[in-house]
Image (spheres, rainbow, N blue to C red):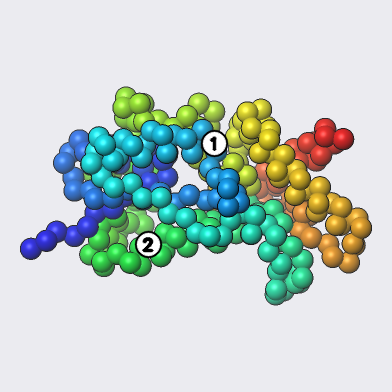
Amino acid sequence: MSRPKYVASCSGGKDSVATLLLAAQYNEPLDEAVFSEVMFDHALSGEVPEHRDFIYDRLKPYCENQLGIKFTVLRTDKTYDDVFHHIIVRGPNKGQKRGFVWPGMCAVNRDCKVPPIRKYNAALSPDTISYVGIASDEPQRLARLEGTNKVSLLDKYGYTEDDALKLCAEHGLLSPIYDHCRRNGCWFCPNASDAELRHMLEKHPDLFDRLLDWGIVLIVVRVILPGQLPIGLLDLLVAGVGAHPKDAVRIVHLSLLHIFCFFSCW
Ligand code: SF4
């Protein structure tokens, strides 16, 4: 009788990479690692550049050549560019451009990151086992695995988040993003921490300028075509006033950084 297929969802972060390493270390079955890449536009990745390079130049070859498992990159045709310029067709903002994604309700996650994963999962046999990178010190997330076909090898072998980080570092498989932050996300993420934003501003100002270009267009449209107000930077600032305090700080911070760049460029 053939065994079920085993796949591991892999963001390239410490927990999912440590899961791959544990599977190899403990001879757990694993057929494929799956990474969903968000694209900024059809040419430019939405991953932080150092992380994107880590995925393609280090992790993917390691999986294929050292671990002997297939490494699949999933993408959808839809990009942040499409999401940003989408014209809203329903509700009070009907007819306006969607603009920047918002903390806590990211349209990029909904439209770009999740759909290819759903499509991939739908094509799997129902008995497929999915390894997920949830550490043994994340009880609430682990509780949600009960009754599903998802398995945490980190929990099975007692690895905390710190243990996962150490294991990756020992194998030279720790993404360089951990030099400046503790999570990986899109470089334009509205949930980005101060450290992540600073990293983008200092190391990749050209990318941040892409957001600035969009912001300028939104402001120009706002001034020239007041009847066609897009959801843009000023809206983010206004939203910050009524948002949850934690989100408000991030919204205002991101907005101020955009506006600061706006004035810096003039
Ligand atoms: S990392 Fe941020 S911008 Fe990217 S999909 Fe997730 S929430 Fe959205």
Against 34, residue 49 (above or below) is above
178 on left or right of 219: left
Q: Tell me which amino acid carries mark 2.
A: Tyr
Point out the image quarter for the C terminus. top right
Placement of the N terminus among the 4 image quadrants:
bottom left
- Element at label 1: helix
Q: Earlier in the sequence, mark 2 or mark 1?
A: 1
| Residue tagged 2 | 120
Taking depth in this image into account, of 43 and 82 the one nearest to the observer is 43
**Mark 1 within 8 Å of ligand 1, using the beta carbon:** no
- In the image as oriented, which residue stretches furthest toward the front? 43
Q: Is residue 233 above or below residue 50?
A: below
- The residue closer to the viewer here, 64 or 190, is 64
- The residue lying at 29 percent from left, 64 percent from top is 124
Question: Can residue 22 be seen?
Answer: no
Residue farthest to the left, as pictured:
1
- Helix, strand or loop at mark 2: helix
Question: Label 2 vs label 1: CA separation?
Answer: 25 Å
The amino acid on which the numbered mark 1 sits, given as a three-letter code, is Pro
Residue drawn at x 25%, y 35% as measured from the top left: 66
Residue 161 percent coordinates (x, y): 38, 36
Question: What residue is at 38 percent from the left and 33 percent from the top?
Answer: 58
Q: Which residue is mark 1?
A: 49
Left or right: where does residue 75 sit relative to residue 146?
A: right
Write down the quadrant of residue 255 in the picture.
top right
Q: Position of residue 165 (x, y in %)?
A: 38, 31
In the displayed structure, does residue 125 sit left or right of residue 223?
A: left
| Mark 2 Cα-neighbour bin, 10 Å: few <14, some 14–19, many ≥20 | few
Instruction: Name the residue at 67% across, 43% down.
Output: 250
